[in-house]
Image (cartoon, rainbow, N blue to C red):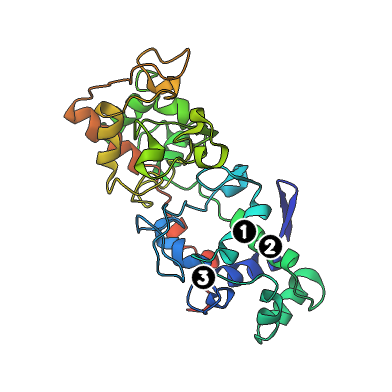
Amino acid sequence: MSSSSGGTTITDAGATLGRVLFYDSQLSADGTVSCSTCHLQAHAFADPSPHSVGISGVPTPRNAMPLFNVRYQRRMFWDGRIIGLENQVLEPIAHPDEMGMDLNHLPARLHSLPHYPALFTDAFGDTAITSDRIRSALAQFIRSIRSFSSRYDEGLANGFANFTEEEQLGRSLFFNGTTRCNQCHSGLTFFSSQLFINGLETNYAAAGDAGRGALTGAPEDDGRFRTVTLRNIGLTAPYMHDGRFATLREVVDFYSDNIQPHPFLDERLTEAGFGPAGQPPYQLHLTEQEKEGLVAFLHTLTDTTLADQWWLSDPFD
């Protein structure tokens, strides 16, 4: 069987090959790190460590992003520097601090392993192993990781009769327009294709990571990062690009009371909520009950099946 996503055809054989590649540590230079090292199924294919660590043993500057529902996203990496999943999937494999593999040597490495010729034949019709085929298979597997089986999805079908009073409070707060939560985390995917400056710092470059600003050098890009999906947010701790918040409550506390002034703070996070960026930060001053309600609602976005689906699991186990 096959399907199409974003112009990419996904086949059972192609996604199966991609699954094996995703979990195979032989894709790293020293055979110790796989894609799954930093993208764990139990954590919705995110990394529970604040700063992901690859073969170099040196913590990277950022926390690895979750990989489900990537088929609906266009910009890759926290700073949005790459457009399209197919253009992204080989980058961590070649990165010296992540998997450190010379892509020119990778096809020969895989051809020497007994299980790959048959898998490539099933997926592509012959035993040829190329970087383009590796790229395609990995993208097919990652695009097949979908997540829409949460208590929230159940609630959409039953009028949220399955929600507790606390969860109902959180849902009301999330969508009421006053908190503006759903202005940046919208639709069924609960994310945005835009990159935002969210007021974690008054000067991100000085704090150590300017995000997109490190690429463009533009002051208006200092601290501009992608907005992650809130689906499975209960599984993907720690939070923010640098994993600074260990709990959802810390995240809610931040957006309620601790957004920092920034000359280009997104207007949705300012007092006015519209107009030019850089206005004074919005202070919600949520009550204890409201904060706990929002946390409870966010946990209803956890997929009840994703972490256990066998066809997304490690085939080497």
The residue indicated by pointer 3 is 34
Q: Is residue 128 left or right of residue 102?
A: right
Q: Classify 94 as above or below 254.
A: below
Q: Are marks 2 and 1 in contact (CB under 8 Å)?
A: yes
Q: Residues within 10 Å of mark 3 (few under 14, many from 20)?
A: many
The residue indicated by pointer 1 is 89
From the top left corner, tell me how far across and down residue 133 is, in percent: 74, 66
| Structural distance between the alpha carbons of marks 2 and 3 | 15 Å
Q: Which amino acid type is marked by label 3?
A: Ser
The residue shown at (71%, 46%) is 6
| Structural distance between the alpha carbons of marks 1 and 3 | 12 Å
Q: Which amino acid type is marked by label 2?
A: Arg
Local SS, label 2: helix
Q: Which amino acid type is marked by label 1?
A: Val
The residue shown at (45%, 19%) is 277
Q: Classify 280 as above or below 212.
A: above
- Number of marks in the rendered image: 3
Q: Which residue extends farthest left?
A: 288
User: Can residue 163 be seen in this snapshot?
Assistant: no
The residue indicated by pointer 2 is 135
Q: Classify 208 as above or below 194.
A: below
From the top left corner, tell me how far across and down residue 52 is, in percent: 41, 60
